[in-house]
Image (cartoon, rainbow, N blue to C red):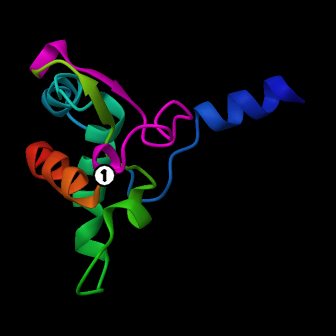
Amino acid sequence: MGADACEALSAFQPDAYVELPDAVNDIILSCLQGAKIAKAFVFGLLNLTTISMPRVSFYLTTGYRCPIRLEGVGAQSKCLEYSDPQVTPLPDNKRSVALQILCFRNLW
């Protein structure tokens, strides 16, 4: 049963499915904020054409928040996922909306 489900899911393609070109995948993998959030960002942008709402929440659309940088700069940064339990005891300014917006702007 598990093997059948795995085989069915690996062959599943929704209607109007378009695979991302390799160039886009290379860009996603080179994103300093992380490949997961870069991929969510790209898919969020692709879905904007189908959403008729005047304001769209990136978090509600994709389910991702920007990672929290603990230390370092650029490629030397050490980050954790926003929901990581180790982030909770950090000062509030590390998890502020302003930093999320700055990270989102840099991602853009």
Provide the residue designation for mark 1.
43
Question: Is 71 situated above or below 102?
Answer: above
Q: x, y (%) of residue 29? A: 23, 23
Which quadrant of the figure contains the N terminus?
Answer: top right
Please tell me which residue lies in front, 75 or 95. Answer: 95
**Which quadrant of the view contains residue 94?**
top left
Horizontally, residue 107 falls left or right of residue 42, namely: left
Q: What amino acid type should be assigned to the residue bearing mark 1?
A: Phe
Q: x, y (%) of residue 9? A: 65, 37
Question: Furthest-top residue in view?
Answer: 76
**Residue at point 49% right, 38% down?**
89
Horizontally, residue 25 falls left or right of residue 92, namely: left
Please tell me which residue lies in front, 51 or 79. Answer: 79
Q: Which residues are magenta?
A: 74-95
Question: Is 79 situated above or below 15?
Answer: above
Mark 1: secondary structure: helix
**Residue at point 14% right, 16% down?**
75
